[in-house]
Image (cartoon, grey):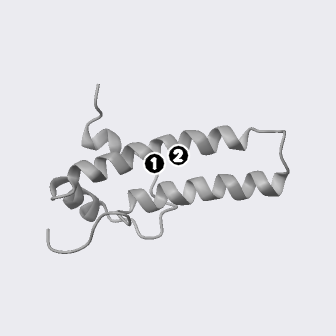
Amino acid sequence: MPQTDDELLAFETSDLEDWGEQRARAALGGRYGALYRNHLRIALHLDSWAEAEGGRTDVDAHYKAGYTQALQDMAAFLRQTYYLPRGPD
């Protein structure tokens, strides 16, 4: 069953440097709403992946920390609408 917009936006925002709920909701209602919903679903997957990577014991701690951070950063960028096309909506 597809997630509602509220469910897709139900994530911790305190670590996001450029979070704007108004911008996110406008993106959901705009021309690229379907694309943004897809980005939010990808971000959820990246969260799960980062959590799983954090539990690994078969890799160097620095590698694991960097890899986990990269996954979290990508999720943050997707949530902050960074990868949506720009221009008139």
Q: Secondary structure at mark 1?
A: helix
Image check: 77 left or right of 9? right
Q: Position of residue 36 (x, y in %)?
A: 30, 53
Residue farthest top in this picture: 1
Q: Are marks 1 and 2 in contact (CB under 8 Å)?
A: yes
For disc 2, the neighbor class at 10 Å (few under 14, some 14 to 19, many from 20) is many
Residue drawn at the location 26% of the way across and 65% of the way down: 23
Q: Residue at x 48, y 63 (%)?
A: 16
Instruction: Return the x and y of residue 27 as percentages of the image width and height.
Output: 23, 59
In the depicted structure, whether residue 17 falls above or below residue 70: below
Q: Give the side of residue 60 with respect to residue 36, left or right.
A: right
Name the residue that disc number 2 marks.
46
Between 39 and 79, the one nearer to me in the picture: 39
> Label 1, on which residue?
43
Q: Is residue 54 above or below residue 65?
A: above
Horizontal and vertical percent for residue 49?
A: 59, 41
Residue lying furthest bottom = 87
Q: Nearer the viewer, residue 37 or 10?
A: 37
Quadrant in the picture for residue 2: top left
Residue 69, quarter of the rendered image: bottom right
The image shows residue 59 at horizontal and vertical percentages of 83, 45
Specify the amino acid type for callout 1: Ala
- The residue positioned 37% from the left and 64% from the top of the image is 83
The answer for how far apart the CA atoms under marks 1 and 2 are is 5 Å
**Label 2 is placed on what type of residue?**
Leu
Q: Residues within 10 Å of mark 1 (few under 14, many from 20)?
A: many
Q: Nearer the viewer, residue 26 or 31?
A: 31
Considering the numbered disc 2 on the image, is that residue within a helix, a strand or a loop?
A: helix
